[in-house]
Amino acid sequence: MRAGPPQARISPEARSAKGCPVSGEAGNAVIDVHNLSKSFGNKQVVVDLTLRVERGEIFGFLGPNGSGKTTSIRLMCGLLTPDAGGGTCLGYDIRAQSEAIKRNVGYMTQRFSFWDDLTIRENLDFTGRVYAMANRRAAVDRALDNLGLTSRAQQLTGTLSGGWKQRLALSACMLHQPRLLLLDEPTAGVDPNARREFWEELHRLAAQGMSVLVSTHYMDEAERCHKLAYIAYGRLLAQGTATEVIAAQGLTTFAVRGPDMAAFAERVRAMPGVDQTVAFGETTHVTGKDAGLLERSLHEAIAGTPSRLERIDTSLEDVFIHLMKGATDNWGEDAQKAPDAKRAKSASAQ
């Protein structure tokens, strides 16, 4: 066989103009961003965020309220332009090709945003019109069937419970058959059974090759993710599998059971080796970095009492409470001074 003519190389600029990915999805990465930063006024809400999400992966994005999770998601899917940094989503440049990203991503917002006075079917049909879908009716029928909404298709959305609204929102963001789902606290305020069913659906989608980036406050949901990232006040503090995140902190945890645990916790907080105490029902988890020192302090604290001491595996919740204690609030006085100081230094250098 005779070789054909050589293939012309397309520059990144030309690929961007054509709406083509600026790069193939390197390896299996669907999100690959580096050093993303974003400020609003004097408040820096995302600081040097570097993140990579693989194909078929459920990636959990955790952090307290106001930590920058929603802003980070919007940066990664092209809804916001970063002040610094860059990268790709689905192979498209997040700065230059945001429209192409939007066509291939399903974004489930934190707040339910569909019309209460339309039926489930009407809301899905409207979403299909927004995407200018050619086979809209067939796509709506498929979405209704996939998430068990067919029997409720004519029900007014305003009469749905939280769990059913959640299903509608998920079916709507999947209507155009995206390659990536970005879910912003999708199960907030939903009962445990509805949350379990929702996560079973996410794992079914991931098994089919769908990639999912999901933000959550729930530790049981975090443990269902393939990988995790923890962000606090705009800064990424940890990432990896749940096992890797826990191991990286090097914490030792003891469970103490006995009477008057509130007084016990107050007493041991100032003892050597004790970094944090957290109440779990009738038990108090006591955590520290120095295992030997921590154990000696706890034995001293329970001496002569009926309290019992047991070393346990450090949980994700223990780790995230520990991380939060070391984080700096970006609304604090020092955080507000930092951007002004940085600008002043830049101006003096000019």
Image: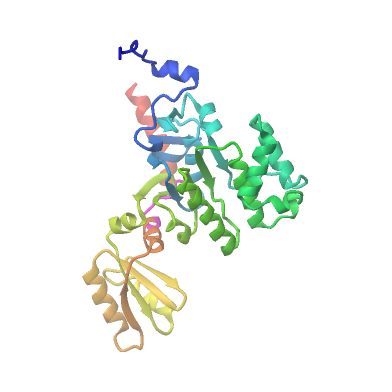
Q: Position of residue 191 (x, y in %)?
A: 60, 62
Q: Position of residue 294 (x, y in %)?
A: 26, 71
Q: Residue furthest front?
A: 1
Quadrant containing the N terminus in the rendered view:
top left
Numbered circles on residues, count: 0
Up/down of 190 relative to 14, above or below: below
Image position, residue 274 (x, y; %): 31, 69
Residue at 24% across, 66% down: 290
Q: Which quadrant, please, contains the C terminus?
A: top left
Image: magenta residue range: 324-330
Q: From the viewer's perspective, is 51 left or right of 129? A: left
| Residue closer to the observer: 104 or 269 | 104
Which image quadrant for residue 130? top right
Residue 267 visible in rendering = yes
Residue at x 46%, y 27% (from the top left corner)? 95
Q: Is residue 276 left or right of residue 111?
A: left
Magenta region, mostly helix, strand or loop? Answer: loop
Taking depth in this image into account, of 143 and 62 the one nearest to the observer is 143
Q: Quadrant of residue 270?
A: bottom left
